[in-house]
Amino acid sequence: MELILKQDVENLGFKDDIVTVKNGYGRNYLIPQGHAIMATPSAKKVLAETLKQRAFKEKSIIEAAQKTAEAISGLEVKIASKVGAGDKLFGSVNNIDVAAALQNAGHEIEKKYINVIGGNVKRLGKYNAVIRLHRDVTIDLPFEVIAEA
């Protein structure tokens, strides 16, 4: 079943992509939830026209994302957390904490676009996170988890 995505779907595609999925997934989840529409010939023509109009706007969006990526790549992000015995944390550090640290540095990035490599961080040390600013612009952000004073 061919569908046109109306919004980004994790592990499937981005908005306005034409994807092929199994009938049940499309009919029972994607279409009723409003994530996709059927890829009929008329819908494909409308999509082509929309993409043509959006191509011009897309350039400026990508340039802004690249400027943000350059600004973020220069940051040294340190996240303070409570520490127990040794270097083990009380709780964990995840994408929400990285988003909060970036917000304190003056960069507003939604937590859903931040992926901490290895999942939740449970020990002190240096780690990496991948930030997707645009479908074509991703950045690798090193950060350090330090003990709270």
Image: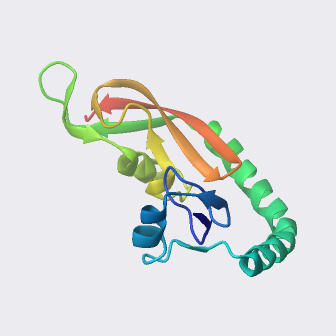
Which picture quadrant has residue 25? Answer: bottom left
Q: Residue at x 57, y 68 (%)?
A: 7
Q: Residue at x 76, y 76 (%)?
A: 41
Quadrant housing residue 138: top right
Q: Nearer the viewer, residue 70 or 4?
A: 4
Give the image location of residue 16, x and y in percent.
Answer: 67, 67
Rendered view: 149 above or below 98: above
Q: Position of residue 81 (x, y in %)?
A: 26, 38
Residue 98 left/right relative to 47: left
Q: Please report the residue visible at 62 percent of the width from the left and 39 percent of the height from the top.
A: 139
Is residue 18 found left or right of 118 in the rendered image?
A: right
Left or right, 144 with respect to 15, comes to left
Quadrant location, the C terminus: top left
For the residue pair 55 and 92, the one nearer the viewer reads as 55
- Provide residue 11's location: percent of width, then percent of height: 50, 49
Q: Position of residue 140 (x, y in %)?
A: 58, 35
* Image quadrant containing the N terminus: bottom right
In this rendering, is residue 149 above or below 25?
above
Most extreme residue toward the left is: 85
Asked which quadrant contains residue 65, the reply is: bottom right
Q: How is the image coloured?
A: rainbow
